[in-house]
Structures are given as C-alpha cells and as structure tokens.
Amino acid sequence: MIATIALSAVLAVLGPLADASDAANGSAASAAQAPENPAITRRVDAQFDAWQRGSLDRSLYALRANEQLGADVVGAISAHLKPLGTLHSANSLFKYKESGSTIYVYSLRCENGSIRMRLGFDPQGKISTVSFEPDP
C-alpha cells in the first residue's frame, strides 16, 4: 500500500487531476469513451518510451510543463517506468477536457506489468499534462 501511494506521488507529474477523478469514474459530464486515434496512440507510445529512457523532447511540451519537469523529476519517474519493460499495447480508455486541454487516458500493457497514462495537449498541440498511475 505504501509503495503504491509513493509510486502515485512520484508518477503524478503535471496538471491538476480533480476533474480526472470524475472521468475515471465514468462521469458522462466529464469523460467520453475515446475511440482509438492512431495519431494520439503513436504520441502516447513515443512519450512512454521517452519517459522510460528519461530523455524528453522539450520542444513537444508546453512552457508550464517544461518548468515543472526538472531532471530530478524525470529521473525519478524514469526509474519507476523502466522495470515495466517493453510496451506491448496502448489501449485508449477515455478522454476529457480540463483547463483548455484535451486529456487522453490510456492503459499501457508492458512486458512486466501495466500502468495508466494520462497525456494532455493544449490548444496548440503541446503536451500540457502527463501522469502515470497504477492501472486498476
């Protein structure tokens, strides 16, 4: 239990998730079933890989996101993601709007486990939100 809480604390990176809890519970007002969008899935795959390697392309991130992602944060999250191993599948669960961004929620199945990833984009297409949490 403590490990899960610590992992969640370390892996919740950017963006407030107050509305996300409603979305996670399937609230029709805040979440919509997200049909598979190959372009978004490719971005999710690429970002998961980048986070596992601990090497982000900062040009893809919004200014606020870049300001919050110090080397210590990226390194800590990378250390937690690496043991999951190779990504086998990324399944779109739902999407929702928050503070002008569109947030996509994916279940990632890896060689050694699974994790849930939220990846949000601002209106300019820059990454505004990233979080990783245990996949229920």
Image (cartoon, grey):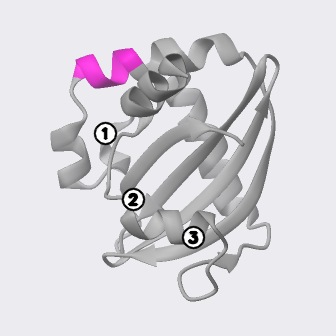
Q: Quick check: can you spot residue 128?
A: yes
Query: Nearer the observer, disc 3 or disc 1?
Result: 3
Q: Residue 58: which disc?
A: 1
Query: Splitting the image into 4 quarters, where does residue 28 fall?
Result: bottom right
Q: Position of residue 103 (x, y in %)?
A: 50, 65
Residue at 67% over, 68% down:
94
- Asked if 49 appears above or below 83 in the picture, the reply is below
- Over which residues does the magenta segment extend? 71-76
Q: Residue 23: which disc?
A: 3
Check disc 1 and report its element: helix, strand or loop.
helix
Residue 73 among those drawn in magenta: yes
- Asked if 65 appears above or below 24 in the picture, the reply is above
| Sooner in the amino-acid sequence: mark 2 or mark 3 | 2
Q: Is residue 9 left or right of residue 52?
A: left
Measured in 3D between alpha carbons, the distance from the residue under mark 2 to the one under mark 3, in whole angstroms, is 10 Å
Which image quadrant: the C terminus? Answer: top right
Q: Position of residue 53 (x, y in %)?
A: 51, 17
Q: Is residue 136 left or right of residue 52?
A: right
Check disc 3 and report its element: helix, strand or loop.
helix
